[in-house]
Image (cartoon, rainbow, N blue to C red):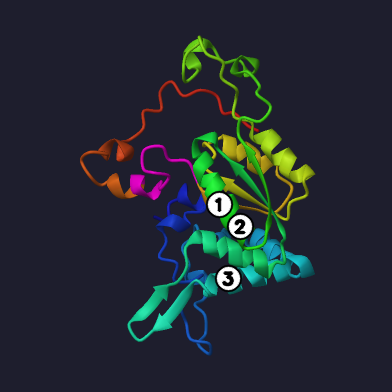
């Protein structure tokens, strides 16, 4: 595993994590950093890790991180039978927003999850939050505007189809001065643009997965089955296009 190529990149997903998360007792010495694999970011990019640690000294970042960690701990309880989880994500978002004294919440949602957006807005309003919601088709920009042909549209060239418009969703929530933006079911790529343009704190309630009921981890679990084995199949790199940046 400690090959020259592997030393050039972080590979935490392949590491047991016994150095960064050793579960040591309070008074126990932590493992020596030199015992971590060569690819460990704490060894390879120590200045980056140190610079990141310094960010937590900023009062507003320190407090935000403290509240996030408090919220994390409150999602578990230690019982005689072991550790248990306590609340679903929607409640976790509500509790964290309350801890941060947020009062105005924005929801950027996919029109395919309009009912879920309506339910989310109602729940947040019942908890005392002001809610601003904006759907992905805001602006009604024709898909042809960004260069799509009729055969690249969902319903073909005969019907008008507006693009998903995450830039407008982000800018609207910025303009509305929401305290927290919640993403609900935006498509892959569209959510990326939202993150790029959103200038307020942001979290995700659910992501788009049309096949697995918006539970994308099901794709990982089922990749071990013969029915979805294609997910684990080696990629054919021939014919790949040029990298696109945003």
Drawn side of residue 45 relative to residue 170, left or right:
left
Q: Secondary structure at mark 1?
A: helix
The C terminus, quarter of image: top right
Q: Position of residue 175 (x, y in %)?
A: 79, 43
Q: Calculate the distance from the C-alpha at mark 3 to the C-alpha at mark 2.
A: 18 Å
Residue, x 66% and y 72% (percent of image)? 66
- Residue, disc 3: 71
Of 188 and 177, which appears nearest the observer?
177
Mark 1 or 3, nearer chain start: 3
**First of labels 3, 2 by sequence position:** 3
Q: Give the residue at mark 1.
A: 120
Q: Residue furthest bottom?
A: 27
64 left or right, relative to 45: right
Q: Could you tell me which secondary element the residue under label 2 belongs to?
A: helix
Residue under the image location 67 percent in, 62 percent down: 128
**Image vertical order of residue 39 relative to residue 111, above or below:** below
Q: Residue at coordinates 40% horizontally, 65% vertically from top-left?
A: 16
* Residues in magenta, as a range: 207-219
Q: Is residue 201 above or below residue 173?
A: below
Image spot of residue 182 (x, y percent): 61, 50
Could you say which is closer to the camera, residue 232 or residue 155?
A: 155
């Amino acid at each position: 595993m400690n090959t020259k190529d592997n030393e050039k990149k972080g590979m935490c997903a392949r590491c047991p994590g016994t150095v960064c998360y050793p579960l040591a007792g309070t008074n126990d010495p932590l493992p020596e950093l030199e015992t971590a694999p060569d690819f460990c970011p704490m060894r390879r990019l120590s200045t980056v890790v140190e610079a990141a640690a310094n960010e937590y000294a900023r009062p507003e970042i320190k407090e935000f991180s403290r509240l996030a960690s408090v919220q994390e701990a409150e999602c578990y309880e230690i019982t005689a039978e072991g550790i248990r989880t306590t609340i679903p994500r929607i409640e976790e978002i509500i509790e964290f927003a309350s801890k941060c004294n947020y009062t105005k919440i924005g929801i950027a949602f996919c029109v395919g999850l309009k009912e879920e957006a309506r339910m989310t807005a109602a729940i947040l309003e019942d908890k005392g939050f002001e809610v601003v919601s904006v759907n992905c088709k805001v602006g009604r920009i024709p898909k042809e505007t960004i260069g799509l042909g009729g055969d690249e549209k969902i319903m073909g060239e005969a019907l008008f189809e507006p693009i998903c418009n995450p830039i407008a969703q982000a800018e609207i929530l910025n303009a509305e001065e929401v305290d927290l933006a919640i993403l609900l079911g935006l498509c892959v790529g569209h959510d990326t643009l939202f993150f790029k343009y959103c200038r307020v704190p942001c979290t995700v309630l659910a992501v788009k997965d049309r096949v697995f009921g918006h539970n994308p981890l099901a794709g990982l679990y089922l990749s071990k089955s013969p029915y979805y084995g294609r997910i684990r199949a080696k990629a054919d790199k021939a014919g790949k296009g040029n990298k696109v940046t945003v």
